[in-house]
Every structure is written in C-alpha cells, then in structure tokens.
Image (spheres, rainbow, N blue to C red):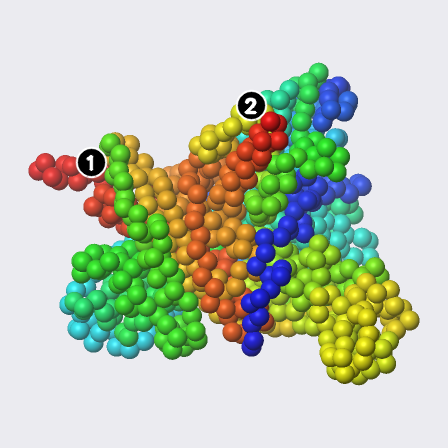
Amino acid sequence: MNIVTDNKWIGQRTIRPDGMDKVTGRAQFAADTSMPGMIWGKILRSPHSHARIRSIDTSRAEKLPGVKAVVTSNDIVDFPIEKGAVMLGIQDMRWMCRNVLARDKVLFPGHPVAAVAATTEEIAAEACKLIEVDYEVLPWSIEIEDAVKPDAPILHEFNKWEGKPSNIMGHIEHKRGDLAEGFKQADIIVERSFTTRPVHQGYIEPHACLISVAPDGKTTIWSSSQGQFMVRAMTSMLTGIPQSDIRAIPAEIGGGFGGKTIVYLEPIATMLAKKSGRPVKMVMTREEVMRATGPTSGSKCTVKIGAKKDGTIVAAHGIFYLQAGAFPGSPIRGAAGCSFTPYDIPNLLSEGFDVCSNRSKVAAYRAPGAPIGAYAVECVIDEVAETLKVDPLDFRLKNAAREGTKAAHGPTFPRIGYIETVEAAKASSHYATPLGGNQGKSQGRGVASGFWFNAGGESSAQVNITEDGNVVVTTGHPDIGGSRAGIANICAELLGIDYRRVSVIIGDTQTIGFSNLTGGSRVLFASSMVVTQSAEKVIQTLRERAAKIWNIDPDAVKWEQGAAHPVSPNAGQFEPLTLRELAEKAPAMGGPIGAGVQLNTQGADGGFGTHVCDVEVDTELGIARVIRYTAVQDVGRAIHPGYVEGQLQGGVSQGIGWALNEEYIYTKDGKVDNPGFLDYRMPVCSDLPMIDCIMIEVPNPKHPQGVKGVGEVPLVPVMAAVANAISNALGLRFYSLPMSPPKISAALDASVKQAAE
Amino acid sequence: MAKIHVTTTVNGEPAEYLCEPNETMLDALRGPLGLTGSKEGCSSGDCGACSITVDDRLVCSCLMLAAEAEGHEIGTIEGLAQGDKLHPLQQKFLEHAALQCGICTSGMLVASDALLRKNPNPSEEEVRFWLAGNLCRCTGYDKIVRAVLETASEMREAAQ
C-alpha cells in the first residue's frame, strides 16, 4: 500500500469537531438528558462479600407512595451456567446477567440485588431500604493468595481446577523453545515476585443512562459507553427486546479507559421503564462507581530471566496470577501475551491464571493486563542489566524484537518500530541530561518498554455530500479522546477541502451500521479505513458526474484540490467543477451523493513504546515525585499529533498514579475503604511534571494512512519506569505497588536498621 | 416541607428558582436552571467538575446549598463566552487539544478563569496548584497547563 506523506490536513493540529460544544458546556453527556415524565432509578446493593440469596421481598417497597416499579433478577433474562458460554465479544452473558443483578448469590459488597424506580431519587432510595433480602452469609476471600488456598471459599461451585472445586477459572500459556535448556545456557538468572493492587479506571463521569420504553416495546437509550452497539446487544440479550427495537444513542462519554465496555445500568433501567411505563433515569454515585464497576485486577506475578555475560537473554519464565473479581475474565491474555514481546527470547514460557474472588467484576483498563505483566518483566530486565553492568537501553537494543522475530503469542513481526523507540529514548535530551539532586532528596532515572496488541474489527461509516457541497461523516464509535478530529483530517485530505467543511458525528445504533467497541486502540485505525473507502466511492461518483457534464470518459477526470479536472489537456478543455458545483447539480445528474462502507478491518499491527522517567525521593517523608518524563512511541502515523500526544500523556499520568498512589484498600470485613476521590488518590495537576512525547512514525503498511493504535501502549511501561527510577535513586528495589510514602519510608527505615546492625 | 424560593443572578441575568433545603447549587443549576454544563463527578468536592464562581470566588457547586445563592452572583461555564465570542481560555483549550473526553473541561475553564482574574501572571507551579482541585483523567494536565499559561501571556499582551 502506498502511503502518501505529503499532506495538507493529515498531521495538522486542527480544531476538533466537538470542541466548541465541550468548551462552552453544551456537550450532552450521559446524565445531561431529561424527558417529560421522567422518573428515577436506584439500586439496592449487597452489604455482604459473599452470601446466598434465600429470598427477596419487595412488597413493602412497592407500596411506598411514589414508587412506580421494582425489579430483581427475575426480570432479567437468565443464562444458565450449565448450558455453557454465550459470548458477546469477550463477555460471557452468563456472568453479565449475574453481574447486572445477582441471581442465586451475591459475590461482592455492592453487587446489585434489586432496583426501584420512583418519582424522585429520594423516594427510590427510601424504597430500596424497604426491600427485605434474606441472606445466608458465606465465607469470602479477596486476595489472590487467599482465593487459591485449598480450603478457600468457592465462588462458582461448578468450576474445577485439577479436578477439584477452585477459584482458578482459566489458564493461558505461550511457549517458545525449551525453557530448561535455555536456563542452562544462562550465566546469570534473576527471579523476582511482584504484587500489584486493583486500580480503578477513574473516569470522571459516573455511569448514567436515561431510557424510555414505549408501550409497543420501542426502546430508546441515552447512555455513555464505549459502544452503543454493545449497549444495544447486551440490553437486548438481558431484557429479551429485539435489537431492531432498541435505539441506543451514544451520549458524549466522560472517560472510559476500558471501564465502559460493559453494561451495568441499561438493562435494569430498561426493565424499570418497561414496567413503569415512564422514562427512567439512573446515575451512579462516585461510591457506586468505586464499589461496583471496574477496577482492573490486582496481581501476583513471578518473573525469571536468564542471560549470558554478553547480554543475550536466553530464557524467560513469567507466571501471572490476575484477580478477576466476582466473575471470570481477568486480562491474562494481555499479561501473558504482551509482557515479553519487545524481546526476542529463544526459550520462553509465559503463563496466566484467572482467579475469582469476592470483589467487583474486573473491567478492561487500558491495554488490559499488559501493564501488570510489563511491570514485573521490565523490573527484572532492569535488574539483569544492572547485574551485567550494561546500560538498560543498550540491553534492550541487544535483545530487541524486530522484523522477522516470532512473538511467543503467535505472529512473526512485520516491520515494527520497537528499536526506533529505544534509539530515540537513548538519543533524547532527557537521557543525555545528568540527574541533579537536592538536600535530603535522591534523584534517580529509570527506563522501561511496553507492547500492546492493538485491534481491528468491525466498523461502519457513511460519507454524505450535503446539498450545499459540504461533508457529513457518520461513524459508529464513541469518540473518547479526539477520534472525530482525526477523521475530519483524513476526510478533508482525501476530498481536498478545508477540514472545517467536514462535520463528523457519531451515529446511533439505528442510523449507522454495526461498529464494534471503542477499545483495543482500534477506533482511528478501523474508522479511517471505512471512511477512506467511503470517501473514495464519493470521489468516484464525483468524477462520474463531472464526466457526464463534460461528456467525456470518467477515467479522463481526476479529483484534486476539492474539484474535478480533466486528467490532461487531451481529455478536453474544461473549467474545474468544484464539490459545491457538483453538489448543486446533483439532483439533475443522478441524485444525492454519498457512500457507506462496512468492514471487518484487518491489519492492526501492535504498538511499542519506551519511556524514560526521573524521580526525586524525599527520604525524610518517603514521597517519590516524578520530575521529568519522556514517552517515546511508534505511533504509525500521527493523523492529529495533538490528540496522539494526549494519549501518551494521559496514559503516562494514569501509570504514575498506579505506580505511586492508587490502590483499592479493603476493610477487615471485605468492603472497599476508599470509594471516593479523596482517599483513592489519582494524580492531580500539582503531582505531575510536563510529559514529553517523542512520536516515531513507522507507518503501518496495511493501513491507507499508516495508522497504528496509540491509546493503550502508553500505560504499559510506566509503573516499571517509575519503579526502576526509584530503585536507581535509593539503591533499593520495590516489588509491590503502589510505591506510596508509607512503603518507601518503611523500606528506607529497614535499610537504615540493617546497616546499623 | 415547603420549597425555598431563591432570587439570584446567574451569568449576569436575574434568575429565580425553587429548591429543597437539602439540594445543592449543582442540583439547582442542572435541574430548574437547566444549565448542565456543570458536571457531577463525585459530589464530595474532590473532582472540581462542578466548579462555579460565587461573587468571583471559585466554589464546588456540589458543596454549596442551592438556597445559599440568594442575593449572590453565580458564574458558570455557560457564561464564559460573550455571545458567539469565546473567552481566550476556551479558544486556547481548543488550539492546544487541552481536552479529550471533555467532562472536566467546564470546571477546568471556570477554575482557570478564576485564577487569571486573581493572578494574570501565574507561574507553572501556581497554575498546577490552583488547578489541583480539578481532576482530569485523560490529558495528564500537560496541555491544560500550557493552554492556561499561554492564554495568560496573550491576555497580558492584549491588556498593554
């Protein structure tokens, strides 16, 4: 595929199509829509970590004045466990139906048990208190080490592991070469175990929806999600309403990071609306978001790497135990599949284990699983390089995956840009600048690399020429970080017109063809493919129209600078026909001009990044601060550099939070003890430095503009880069996250004590 | 319980509404006043998505009772632009790609405007500490801080 690099709009920092609405407060997010006659839904949640539901009595709640409907799991379609998996994407509806409303058992504090719709939120909340649930309380476990003990309380009794009831729900492994033989060749072997805590995606917009069900069953859903088609399909499967009767309208989405790739409220609100005959609005509180949605897995990982004295890695073994929460489905594929992928390791075994325990069901979080695995692997890589007294970037270069390397998870790499990211990090002014140091503060520098698969999949687009000669592009993916701006750039480029003449909107489920989730860093990759093909069809029509007007062959017409021209003087002498003129003449020349394309897109190459991080540790207080950060990434092609940098900077800041502060803290009775932004400490503006970006462009040869996914890679290396920097600053290694002040202080105190003894 | 009648000024216009004694200013803005530009991210004053000004003082509207607006001047994101003319901060946020999902943007802009009114020449550190009450999970704050600093610089030049 021939990728044109001399562009007018691609690569420009244009103003995003939805920007004006967002800086003026006009943009409609999920909670911003109202309807006449609207009532409010509230959820009754489990107070227990693990309990069998003996009975639910809703009669008192139903009698409370103002209450219009009550639902329990009896109102939700059951997917019986024994009948086997019913998959929608990567989600098994057997677990989804039980996560949305508990059936026989509650599996975590906050698990929905029933829901009420009433004329006010207060009445709905009051009515929830009147619902009587008879629970048989069961023993529970949250931490992986407790959940895998032989006598652990079992969440899903049907599940067996090695012939016995178990909370280990699944296993994945990637193999290459002969592990034992590989380690025999090693001059040095480093083996370390790591712990990470559950962290939340932390989107600022809580889950919300407004749903109307007409008496004929026609359902309209306004909600914010990472996929209106996912909302439609899951709501349909869980309520029995056919997809053709459900119009899911994507509200602007106030952050998702993977956490809005499943439904929580929509099926419940649909059933409340259906039963009450009134539109129902539901908005989660922050506390509900923290207790019952997301987070990602906590983990226990062990990584062993063997290398020769000359710096060649000869063998590696990774074991990644990830916490799935109440239902199976932790991201072991990302942990086992991505963590060693930047390296060409001849003998490798990478294993993942999916472990259920009594906390909320895991939800995807930016490169699911990969940052957890990379944290462990990249810290051990750092230790091996240190032992061998090799520069950590040189060590990575020596072992780097390149074109032709066979990755353990399957593919043989095409042309990839990993080496370029390491070389650029090495050549950066950041890496060349010596560290400073203040009184009582130690500075250190760390590096780390990361990989994420990226994804293609189904996308649809429609490109229409308006009667006045402008352009409307409709796609089917919620725009979570500026994808509309990228699409406007591409469409303007292809049509040769000013980008401000291109309006880009996200269609609802009944106005645009099926489009899979906004996830896997797939949106601009996939939607620009369908938009490109649609625009090419439109251009073909425009050339045909001009040919008809000029009475020449369409092949004798070319499209340039927003107008049809004869390809050469031989084709005839004609004044160019602009898009506006052709639109004006459209009714007489064959009708409206527009084209749609639907594809299951292929060719999404994985992405690599290498990060450099400087920290300063206050050794009195144990506080580590990131003082300089550079993220280098092979981005394929930066269609809108501002929003590509934004992905890098955003991913890095989430990783810094994960590394230094963020964690779920549980009380002794198994409840989340920090379900708010005060105690769940995400990075604030004063915590961070500027985050420098170096975008390497190794175009994806399988994409018309060379696009690679960019959104998820930037989170993958961060925790290791920060950990390696802290180790460099203190001469102490930390094997668990977060590296919060109490932990750093304790380690410093212990090392002082040790030195004294 | 009878509702409370409140007479106030919102974005320079006289406004009246009825509220429950326990309703927040954010509830009143998003409900009877129909101004949904202020967002609810936490309802505990931690995220700043509901930032407004009360007589030019920056406030989390989720921490203020609706009844307290009586006799005061309320400023929200909807009042930042003058007609179809954007405030320089709004323009600079667009140019710098200083927003991704946009849920924090209203609060960020209201807070940044309050800062520049108080301190037309802030340092990077002053911007970062002033905006520390406004959470953004998408951008890492880099482009937001740059947009505020550049706006301040251009507004100072324009004022000379």
Residue occupying the point 48% across, 43% down? B142
In the picture provided, is A287 more to the left or to the right than A31?
left
* Residues beneath discs 1 and 2 located on the same chain: no
Q: Quadrant of residue A462?
A: bottom right
The residue tagged 1 is A749
Q: Quadrant of residue A439?
A: top left
Residue A416 position in % (x across, y down):
42, 70
Q: Which residue is mark 2?
A: B118
Choose between B88 and A318: the one closer to the eye.
B88
Q: Quadrant of the C terminus of chain B?
A: top right
Q: Is residue A390 visible?
A: yes
Name above or below for residue B38 compared with residue B10. below
Label 2 Cα neighbours within 10 Å, binned few <14 / some 14-19 / many ≥20:
few
Considering depth in this image, is A545 or A30 the residue closer to the camera?
Answer: A545
**Residue type (three-letter) at the residue carrying disc 2:** Lys
Q: Secondary structure at mark 1?
A: helix
**Residue at 50% in and 52% down:** A645
Q: Residues within 10 Å of mark 1 (few under 14, many from 20)?
A: some
Residue A150 in view in this figure? no
Marks 1/2 in contact by CB < 8 Å: the verdict is no
Above/below status of A622 relative to A386: above
Task: In the rendered structure, find residue A364 and report the number of the disc placed on it.
Answer: none
Point out residue A26 in the picture as x, y percentages from the top left corner: 70, 41
Q: Chain of mark 1?
A: A
The answer to which of A22 and B15 lies nearer the viewer is A22
In this rendering, the answer to whether A342 lies above or below B138 is below
Q: Is A568 situated left or right of A399 in this image?
A: right
Residue A611 placement (x, y as % from top left): 37, 54
